[in-house]
Amino acid sequence: MKMAALCNDFGDLVQIKKQLISVISLCKERGLLHSAKWASELAFSLEPLSKEDLPPAAPFTEDDAQDLDALTLAKSYFDLKEYDRAAYFLKGCCSQKAYFLYMYSRYLSGEKKKDDETVDSLGPLEKGQVRNEALRELRVELSKKHSAGELDSFTLYLYGVVLRKLDLLKEAVKVFVEAIHALPLHWGAWLELSNLVTNIEMLKSLSLPDCWIKDFFMAHMYTELQMIKEALQKYQNLIEAGFSKSTYIISQIAVAHHNFRDIDQALALFNELREQDPYRIDNMDTFSNLLYVRSMKPELSYLAHNLVEIDKYRVETCCVIGNYYSLRSQHEKAALYFQRALKLNPRCLGAWTLMGHEYMEMKNTSAAIQAYRHAIEVNKRDYRAWYGLGQTYEILKMPFYCLYYYRKAHQLRPSDSRMLVALGESYEKLSQQVEAKKCYWRAYSVGDVEKMALLKLAKLHEQLNESDDAAQCYMRYIQDIFSCGEQLEHAEVSTALRYMGQYYFKNKLYNEASICAQRCCDYNDAREEGKALLRQISQVRDQIETPSADLFAPLSNNNTPVRRVSPLNLISFTP
């Protein structure tokens, strides 16, 4: 399938469907089942073709005819996972298809032996040096063929996988790009390349074919690089282009909303996905994360039971059950299921991270650190693992380590207030108050998820005796909490009111101080101090009373009491 035959826009959906049908056949013949599944799901979302529009069969060469019997026999063994047997009968075959299956059988045989040895001899947290022994031989043989220009698109893809497994990442990137140019419709090559792209600059530097499938890759990459708004725009464009029925796109949009912490929207999309594809297991571990965050125990229990009925030995099923036990605070059982997931797939990123969380709950910091490090080895872009390592070292009271890991997490999620607040706390522990102020203010500016940044900034100003600045921050904090209706639930409101009462009293603004003192009486931990302040105010209050201002009006209101004192100039603290 040559590039000339590929349309580079979405104007002709019939042509796209024909290309998908062709590549499904090519992938199935070579045992590339995940790529075939992806293309099949996408083709299913498009309108059926008429008999006349169906693509012709792939051309059949003399070498293909010569190897047909051996290839048919070997493929039957390959499908039954008898990889060594398949490779034995393909040795000496000449056709490109037979050569790929020969090399791929040898690669998978090595992987299977490695996984078996890992499961038998090592616990999931032990590092181990078990390697696929076939990799070096495969690299030598494929390298010679590559230099001679004798590799087709699928064998180039396999060569790239071998290089990645040997940690020759720069070479692997070049080979995957070459494989994509040779056959742009092979989704497996795009996915392998996506695992090696570490940042947006590297993504922009890649020379990729101008083909419609590139839009799917870019949307996937934007999601991976936490560029959620750009990813959602790409997926919206794909829906408008004619892929509105694609369950793949719905699942990716749901994952993007999950990464963006838009939990309600993500839950709605996953529920829609379950209605359209009730036996789907892909991405259900992400769905279970959302149910866990919302503490939706009955729904998570139903999902876990449902997936066990479908396939109890899938990685996603084990992760869902692990989340269910974690929500029930049965952390040992949860860790056991995450370990089971890792035995099924040692490169399962979510299982490593979630197991790290469970070990944290069990106060086993050394095991948590190992689990998070494994997660980073699988995917350096996983901000949750970096953040988890920061939290672990925080428990161990090692602030320099915390700072390093929180910085890494912040680089991956620059607009996540939780990373910024954690950074600020680390700077504060290291007595770098100016940097801490910047982090807290930045966290407030990007939209403080946990409503903690202003409070921490105010307390820092209070420690530094910057009373006007502290008062401004406390006032903003009180207004924010009251405006979102959490004033009775939030424990720290009393701290802010207590400070503001004392601040106004010192500045002889007795009416405002009185309002704060009265509000303090609504909270158990500040009631006595509120009453004491009211007694002080009654003793010193002047005979002439000034009109009381609306203390909790928006900041734009010129009557806000804060306007009477020197306002905090926060511009200098903005990074």
Image (tube, rainbow, N blue to C red):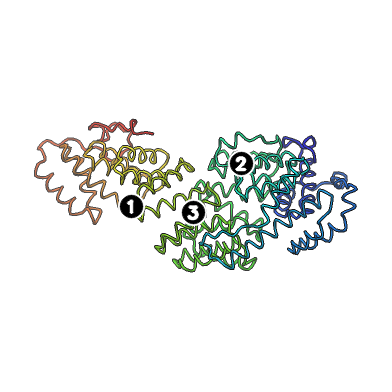
Residue at 58%, 59% (x, y): give it.
346
Q: Nearer the viewer, mark 1 or mark 2?
A: 2
| Residue behind mark 1 | 490
Tag 1: residue type?
A: His
Label disc, if present, on residue 116 of the rendered structure? none
Q: Secondary structure at mark 2?
A: helix
Q: Where is residue 318 shown, x and y percent of the image? A: 57, 64
Q: CA distance from mark 1 to mark 2?
A: 50 Å
In the rendered picture of this protein, how many numbered marks are placed on residues? 3
Q: CA distance from mark 1 to mark 3?
A: 35 Å
Q: Nearer the viewer, mark 2 or mark 3?
A: 2
What is the quadrant of the C terminus in the image?
A: top left
Q: Residue 570 falls in which quadrant of the image?
A: top left
Residue at 73%, 49% (x, y): give it.
141
Label disc, if present, on residue 373 of the rendered structure? 3
Q: Secondary structure at mark 3?
A: helix
Q: State whether residue 290 appears in this view.
A: no
Viewed as shown, does residue 219 lie left or right of 502? right
- 10 Å neighbourhood of mark 1: few (<14), some, or many (≥20)? few
Would you place residue 310 above or below residue 462 in this image? below
Q: Earlier in the sequence, mark 1 or mark 3?
A: 3
Q: Nearer the viewer, residue 368 or 438?
A: 368
